[in-house]
Amino acid sequence: MDSRERYRQVLTKYRSNPTEPGGDVCWSPELECAPRSRLREIQSDKLVAAVAFLWDYSPLYRRILAQVKLAPSDIKSIDDLYKLPILRREHFVDSHLAHPPWGDYSPISQSMWSQDGWLLFTTGGTTAAPRPFRMTRFDRDMAAWLFARGFWAMGVRPGDVGSFITNYGPHIFFWEAQQGLHHIGCPVIALGGADLKRRIDFQRNFPATVLGATASFALFMGERMKAQGFDPRESGVRILFNGAEPGGCVPATKRRVEELWGATLHEWFGATEVGPSGHSCVFEAGQKQRPMNLHFIEDAYIVEVVDPTTLEPVGEGHDGVLVMSGLYSEGTPFPRYLLGDYTRLTTSRCECGRTTMRAIGGMYGRMDDMLSIRGSHLYPSAIEDVVRGVRDISEAYEVVIEKRDGQDHVTVRCEPRPGIPEARWAEVVQTVVREVSSALEVKVAVELKPYGTVSREFKAKRIYDLRKAKG
């Protein structure tokens, strides 16, 4: 049997509850509450099929395996996972540059895609040229099923109406999320191309109950609604879900969003190179004592945390960076891709009943975003949690780090909330300086700018480390 067809058959074989939910809490109880041993069996079967498929159809992956003298027959189960080299973003970047316009990493050829394709997606292009990924109709159907399972865990049910207020563009997340809501039976109002006024008008006139956006934009839109006399808490939204940036797992941001909207904020985690790999659940979103833990969809992924320097595995509960093997799609079936997000893992059973591995506190920084300031090591999410905990400033902020006279200097650029008079600005500045400096143990300066002047773009950049730019 052709390795592509074999791979598709293996993935389909484990698609429990493909069209209808199997329980009130879990869409696929057989998979989401499976014993750890059963999950390893499923992962083994998919891993073996994926490596064979890539060997036959991805020239880049075949070269990578040949360099370490591995053949598909050497991978017999998940116990052989660590024989496989870790893939980095640079593998795809170099492939893309050497073999334009597609690179030679994808196992989906142009002829395959033109006959059986769904959409073309690219990475965001914030750290390198955008890399293209051709996704097939098979990928679309698998993503719809995975997203339906995640949304079901968040409490989305038939009768809900979704609205996405973030631009889709060539980015995969909201396209797949839309398929997931459709899979449950929920209609979607897609407003990515609309301006803010139109988005607010739609929510007023055609209210959605499930709102998808970055947490930053949900805060911005909610404040604008209030300024227009339209209380977000009366808008009909009961669930918000955040993706593409930290939010739901940053306590101060989650608290702000939920207080503003009178709704529950959930979190999705994933990447173009691996797909929709992690999500929150009703229990995690409901507790307020700590950052949410995120469930990984382990029957479709293999999750590892490794030391950021040695790339050797670290134990459960220890800090490291995330490595993912995406085993759900034809377009991105890459084992051991280094995402580089810092987290810790636990296999303890969640109160919701799921047995899948969880990211403790979600993702709290990337290995290329870790900040070292005057000897202190800070995650961007820690900065966000502190800044957004200051109630008198708006949802938008920027942190600028630069070297002057041999010393690190940190400036927080932020805005007062609407309605705070200019006479109180000096007081607001003092509060931000006190709270941020105390919590992070780093002295900061504050620039307070007029409301609406700090960037609120999709995946808006928040940290500007000018030391790197100069060096």
Image: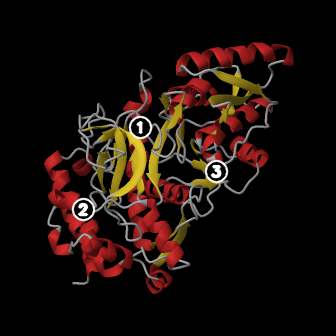
Q: Position of residue 54 (x, y in %)?
A: 31, 74
* Residue 14 circle label: 2
Compute the Cα span from label 2 to label 1: 27 Å
| Mark drawn on residue 219 | none
Q: CA distance from mark 3 to mark 2?
A: 33 Å
Image-based side of 156 in relation to 85, left or right: right
Mark 3 or mark 2: whose residue is earlier in sequence: 2
Please report whichever mark, 3 or 1, sits nearer to the chain's N-terminal start. Answer: 3
N-terminal of the pair, mark 2 or mark 1, is: 2
Mark 2 closeness class: few <14, some 14–19, many ≥20 residues within 10 Å: some
On the question of residue 117 being in view, the answer is: yes
Q: In front: mark 3 or mark 2?
A: 3
Q: Quadrant of residue 450?
A: top right
Q: CA distance from mark 3 to mark 1?
A: 22 Å
Q: Which residue is mark 1?
A: 362
Image quadrant holding the N terminus, namely bottom left
Residue at the spot of label 3: 166
Give amino acid for label 1.
Gly
Indicate the position of residue 162 as horizontal and vertical percent values. Answer: 57, 49
Mark 3: which secondary structure? Answer: loop
Amino acid type at mark 2: Tyr
* Residue placed most toward the observer, 269 or 207: 269
- Check disc 3: other Cα within 10 Å, few if <14, some if 14-19, many if 20+: many
- Is the C-beta separation of discs 2 and 1 under 8 Å? no
Q: Nearer the viewer, residue 39 or 447?
A: 447
* Residue at the spot 64% in from the left edge and 14% down from the top edge: 434
Would residue 134 be seen by someone viewing this image from the given angle? Answer: no
